[in-house]
Amino acid sequence: MQRTATFLWHLVPTATLAIALALVSPGGVRAQDTATTAETPSPRRIVISLTERRLHLLEEGRPPRSFPVAIGRPGVAIPLGDSQVLRKRRNPTWHPTANQRRDNPALPASVPPGPSNPLGEFALDLGWTAIAIHGTNEPDSVGRRASGGCFRMLPADIAALFEMVPVGTPVRVVSGPAIVPAPQPASAVAVPAALPTPAPPPSLPIVPDPRCTTAGAPLRRMICTMPDLAALDGRARGLHQRHLAALPAERRDAAAYALLQEERRFDDRITARCWVRRGMEEDPAVAAAARACLSDALTVRLEQAKRR
């Protein structure tokens, strides 16, 4: 049964939106795959921009978070308007639709969880027929027009989103850029006077990136010019140098090269995930979201360096 829900948001004028129903996509929904169905009031909202090919997670009092998504390939209808998360499925089974099996008779009736499943490990079923936000076994397709109408996410991103949003979370799909609220200034957040000042964490050596004097790539320029990001990055570098210094001399060069390659992969992955690009400084909301995303990524990288 088709279900849709309209939510009175002030992010995008509702007069510009139309609800597209009865669409076909690989995210087929079957009751036996349902992991969670009870509706829960959610303080979070999801806005998906087809132009940006981004999913924005909005929550009052926190900077918006943004993730790349794959959208419907050319010629495939994509839903627009308001819906909600109806079901959450872990390790979903994929059921090709009748149209998909007619176009490709070789498709099986269903594909169980595993590396061949195009839904990945997590799926959030929406109120449109056979439309979901889900993972993928083709991560290179994320950010492109490549799906059958669903919204594909990178495996790590859908895993994080799956844990953050409950059933009932409002979802809006817009054709143009998403209008997201600017983050609340830190000075406007009241801090109770009774709270004790936490003890500062143990200081770690901060080793600056030697490329900062010539940084041209948007990601490195952003890290180098923002003190909080530079500190996180510099502490990870300090821990990496400490790790290298403790290694035997015959292993040091190989380990240093491995760390360099790891950093390059990190830069490529986080540039796409945090949507860091040239000219983003012109939009304060986009820049703030990228900065928050990058801060989270660098924090995780620092924690990994501590465990090395």
Image: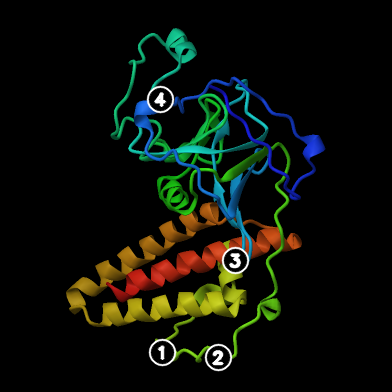
What residue is rendered at 60% in x and 65% in y? 62
What residue is rendered at 73% in x and 30% in y? 18
The crowding category of the residue bearing disc 1, from other C-alpha atoms within 10 Å (few below 14, some 14 to 19, many at least 20), is few
Question: Is residue 156 among what the camera can see?
Answer: yes
What residue is rendered at 37% in x and 61% in y? 261
The residue tagged 4 is 30
Question: Residue 73: x percent and y percent?
Answer: 57, 27
Q: Are marks 4 and 2 in contact (CB under 8 Å)?
A: no
Which amino acid type is shown beneath numbered disc 1? Ser
**CA distance separating discs 2 and 3:** 30 Å
Which amino acid type is shown beneath numbered disc 2? Ala
**CA distance separating discs 1 and 4:** 52 Å
In the displayed structure, 163 sits above or below 298; it is above
Foreground label between 2 and 3: 2
Foreground label between 4 and 2: 2
Could you say whether the residue bearing mark 1 is in a helix, strand or loop?
Answer: loop
**CA distance separating discs 4 and 3:** 39 Å
Question: Residue 31: x percent and y percent?
Answer: 39, 27
Foreground label between 2 and 1: 2
Could you say whether the residue bearing mark 2 is in a helix, strand or loop?
Answer: loop
Question: Residue 297: x percent and y percent?
Answer: 47, 64
The residue tagged 1 is 203
Q: Are marks 4 and 3 in contact (CB under 8 Å)?
A: no
